[in-house]
Amino acid sequence: MANIEKPNIFQRIKRWFKETGGELRKVSWPTREEAIALTRIVLIAMVIMSAILGVLDFIFARLVGLLVNI
């Protein structure tokens, strides 16, 4: 059986950075316009979800308040 040495921590870190850089070169990055449009969509979705959760929190807080005061 061949004696295969385990790479030390520095070799493993170096390999990780090298492989990560290779993967990042394969990524299809969005254009500036696409990034702005997607950011706008995320911000709108956040505002809508925040409003919905705020209303639900208010309703449940009132319901719990009514149950506690009985």
Image: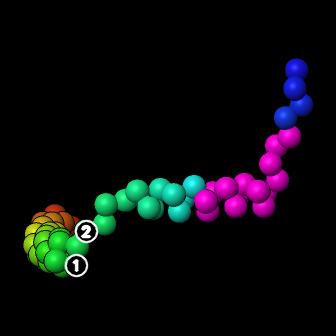
Residue kind at label 2, given as amino acid type: Pro
* Location of residue 52 (image quadrant): bottom left
Q: Real-space Cα distance between discs 1 and 2?
A: 7 Å
Q: Which residue is mark 2?
A: 30
Q: Which residue is mark 1?
A: 32
User: Count of labels shown?
Assistant: 2
**Mark 1–mark 2 contact, CB under 8 Å?**
yes
* Location of residue 59 (image quadrant): bottom left
Name the mark on residue 16.
none
Residue 37 location (% of width, % of height): 14, 75
Color theme of the render: rainbow
- Quadrant holding the C terminus: bottom left
Residues drawn in magenta: 5-18
- Quadrant holding the N terminus: top right
Crowding at dot 1, Cα within 10 Å, few <14 / some 14-19 / many 20+, comes out as few
Front residue (pair 14, 43)? 14
Residue 51 location (% of width, % of height): 11, 75
